[in-house]
Amino acid sequence: MTLRRLEQPGNNLVEIFLVLEYIPAYFSKWKRELTADFRKFSSMGVKERMLNGEQRSSFCATLLENGPEKHGLSDLVWAAATIYGAAYETLNHMEQILRWSINCDPELYGADAEEFYPERHLNPNGTLKDEKGDGHFTFGFGRR
């Protein structure tokens, strides 16, 4: 099981059928697997590397140095997973923002490039200007 799957809300049956939480681990394979995965992802080897002196500075190492007594290991694990998830999910949004910023280039579209002004793409007779002979950044290049 991956960290990605573990962090998704509602992905495990125990979150839907709460009575499953009270079934002993020796009856439920999923409970043993999730417990093993939790232990595996909880440390990810950071503690061991810190004890061996091999750990470089990182978010997880800083949490372990400063916080286990105050917050508990479980909370620190979730804090680290949240940071990881936020960084992973941000990539698609940043790519979209960069695509939009290409269309706001003042050298190409004028000083008011960020303003909604669709008439900039029309000829005086109302037809579309042939500004982009090779395609358009927003929709990519080539045939559709």
Image (spheres, grey):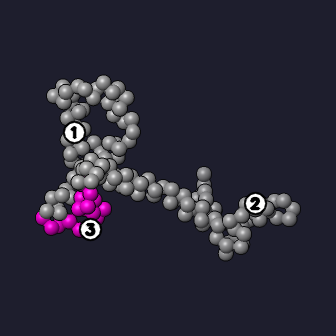
Which element type, helix, strand or loop, lies under badge 2? Answer: helix
Q: Amino acid at mark 2?
A: Pro
Residue at point 64%, 67% (across, down): 104
Q: Nearer the viewer, mark 2 or mark 1?
A: 1
Is residue 47 among the parts visible in the rendering? yes
Does the magenta-highlighted stretch encompass residue 53?
A: yes
Q: Give the labeled residue for mark 2.
A: 118
Q: Give the labeled residue for mark 1.
A: 35
Residue 87 position in % (x across, y down)? 41, 57
Decide which of tag 2 and tag 1 comes sooner along the chain: 1
User: Looking at this rendering, what residue extends furthest in the front direction?
Assistant: 70
* Rendering quarter of residue 63: bottom left
Does the magenta-highlighted stretch encompass residue 98?
A: no
Residue at point 79%, 62% (across, down): 119
Q: Quick check: marks 3 and 2 in contact, CB under 8 Å?
A: no
- Vertical order, 61 against 37 (above or below): below
Residue 117 position in % (x across, y down)? 76, 62
Left or right of residue 118, residue 2 in this image: left
Q: Amino acid at mark 1?
A: Thr
User: Looking at this rendering, what residue extends furthest in the left direction?
Assistant: 52
Residue 141 position in % (x across, y down)? 59, 60
Which element type, helix, strand or loop, lies under badge 1? Answer: helix
Q: The magenta stretch spans which residues?
A: 52-68
Q: Which mark is residue 57?
A: 3
Decide which of tag 3 and tag 2 comes sooner along the chain: 3
